Amino acid sequence: MDSAVDAPQMSLLPMTRKTPRLKGSYRLNDFLIQRTLGTGSFGRVHLARSKHNLRFYAIKVLNKERIVRMKQVEHTNNEMKMLESVQHPFIINLWGSFQDCGNLYMVMDFVPGGELFTLLRRSNRFPDPVAKFYAAEVALALNYLHQLDIVYRDLKPENILLNSDGHIKIADFGFAKHCATTTWTLCGTPDYLAPEIVSQSRYNKSVDWYALGVLIFEMLSGLPPYHQAEPNHLALYEKIMQGPRFIRWPAAFNENATDLILKLMEPDPSRRYGNMHHGAGDVFAHPWFREVDWERLSKREITAPYLPRITGDGDASAFDNYPEDNVAATYGLAQPDLYGTAFPDFEYTNPTLL
């Protein structure tokens, strides 16, 4: 596609840090732990307020024993390293990390608008310009990560947060990995897996561009392309391996959107947009993105299509409510620590308890 040569040059270059983010040294008693923002297999994310600067943060608390038992030590260490190495307007900031006898803690931006997933489910599906706005910001973030040889591997609406200004912040780097050439780990969300991951072949950063195609489809239709009412991973993987020619396309889809989705979900990675001679330039120059001003978008100068209803700092009403179970009272307790050495890059805030 000749127009790819004319893609915006800023989009083909890594966005370097102009003002490096300083890594802070934190401990649990620096914060007032407030409500839970989300839960997972290894712990939960809390809204917290700094006792020093009074700013609100999201603190991800992970139980070390559970991480070790479920063989997720490498993924957890990778997440911290990846977040520490990136700084981009559409990626969540990690301000610092630490550990105590029982838990790991990651101090991150509090992104008050909640998940893109919640907005999408509430809207049923997005109009074409709205889907295009979010897809364009995701594309800029992916290109930045790929310039740093980072493959993200977990793109989905649940991992895209909305800031107070409506612009995105990609979160959850648990599956992210440095990948200069290829890798082969089977990980990610089933609906978003590229066929080469499903077939357990070696793959490269182009799996993220495949996932962008799935994301665009889900934003425009309300559901992923191979969605099944009853989860059946084997049947889902069979459809993924058959390829996008078996997708049932909604009649309302924009022709250019369909074309881009097909080019991103191309089963052959060597022919997939984002992975050919012009790299991400093919994506940026596609006709579906014709009216996007990439330079202004990268500076967040374009007004977002949806502004979260935020009443003030610390407003977490966009997040679901979870039983608190007084879990925060269990953090920082003195106890035997069998796993501290498994997480060497998390600062130990209670060294006398080792």
Image: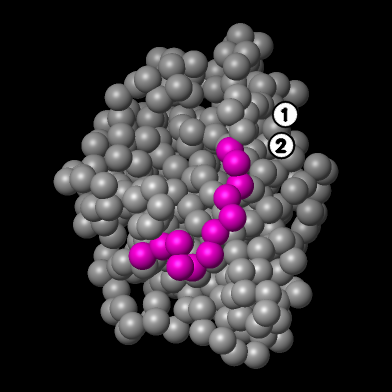
* Residue 200 appears in the picture as rendered: yes
Query: Does dot 2 land on a helix, a strand or a loop?
Result: loop
x, y percent for residue 291: 40, 15
Q: Earlier in the sequence, mark 2 or mark 1?
A: 2
To which residue does mark 2 refer?
A: 148
In this picture, residue 146 sits left or right of residue 10: right
Q: Which mark is residue 113?
A: none
x, y percent for residue 206: 68, 41
Report the residue at 27% width, 65% height from top: 320
84 shown above or below 72:
above
In the displayed orientation, state which residue is furthest to the bottom.
Answer: 336
Q: Quadrant of the C terminus?
A: bottom right
164 shown above or below 248:
above
x, y percent for residue 271: 70, 34
In this picture, residue 317 sits left or right of residue 34: left
x, y percent for residue 19: 58, 28
| Magenta span includes 102 | no
Q: Considering depth in this image, is 324 or 286 the residue closer to the camera?
A: 324
Give the magenta part as a residue range. 21-32
To which residue does mark 1 refer?
A: 276
In the displayed orientation, state which residue is furthest to the right.
Answer: 181
User: Are there few (<14), some (14-19), or many (20+) residues within 10 Å of tag 1?
Assistant: some
Q: Quadrant of the N terminus?
A: top right
73 shown above or below 304:
below
Report the residue at 26% width, 56% height from top: 316
Query: Does dot 1 land on a helix, a strand or a loop?
Result: loop
| Quarter of the rendering containing residue 164 | top left
Report the residue at 28% width, 60% height from top: 319
At label 1, which amino acid type do we have? Met
* Spatial CA span between label 2 and label 1: 18 Å
Report the residue at 82% width, 43% height from top: 181
170 shown above or below 100:
above
